[in-house]
Amino acid sequence: MLTQTCDLANRRVSSVTGAVVLDAQNLVDRGLLKPADVRGPIRAGRVYGWYFLPENRPLGLPEMIVDFRQLRTIRLDLLTDLARRCRRRARLQSPYREHLADTFSRIGLPEPYETM
């Protein structure tokens, strides 16, 4: 989910933006990527619109690629219901969270600026 946490917590939005997350090994197995592409340019952040996530063995999550070229929108009430029924939830920790924010984020201002 890419919608700002403060917007979710303060119920300022009625829908949430998310990006498609792809299993890197699955893409290699299907012949869509070469292992060297994952180890090289994708992991280094040199592929436009893709963000690499390393595996997380304790959660059983493989190496993944966030595809910012495939965004989805889901109603907040539906997402909340799905989250209540879900057994596993993962969050990005530092430094990945900040690095991802550099790729896809907005800057929050203390007060809205005036428009013409």
Image (cartoon, rainbow, N blue to C red):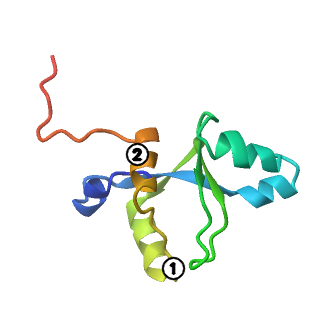
Residue 86 is labelled as: 1
Q: Which amino acid does label 2 sit on?
A: Ala
Residue 50's image quarter?
top right
Please give the name of the residue rendered at 41% of the width and 40% of the height, measured from the top-left corner: 102
Please give the name of the residue rendered at 44% of the width and 66% of the height, measured from the top-left corner: 91
Residue 114 appears left or right of 60: left
Please give the name of the residue rendered at 39% of the width and 50% of the height, measured from the top-left corner: 98
Kindly report the distance in space between the C-alpha atoms of the residues bearing marks 2 and 1.
25 Å
The quadrant in which the C terminus is found is: top left
Residue 49's image quarter?
top right
Please give the name of the residue rendered at 63% of the width and 47% of the height, measured from the top-left corner: 43
Residue 89's place in the image compared with 114, above or below, is below
Residue 24's place in the image compared with 81, above or below, is above
Q: What residue type is labelled 1?
A: Cys
Residue 62's image quarter?
bottom right
Q: Which of 34 and 80 is in front in this view?
A: 34
Q: What element carries label 2?
A: helix
Q: How many labels were placed on the picture?
A: 2
Image coordinates for residue 75, horizontal then vertical, percent = 43, 58
Image coordinates for residue 8, horizontal then vertical, percent = 30, 59
Please identify, in this view, whether the residue under mark 2 or under mark 1 is nearer the observer: 2
Image coordinates for residue 79, horizontal then vertical, percent = 45, 66
Image coordinates for residue 73, horizontal then vertical, percent = 49, 51
Residue 9 appears left or right of 70: left
Pointer 2 residue: 101
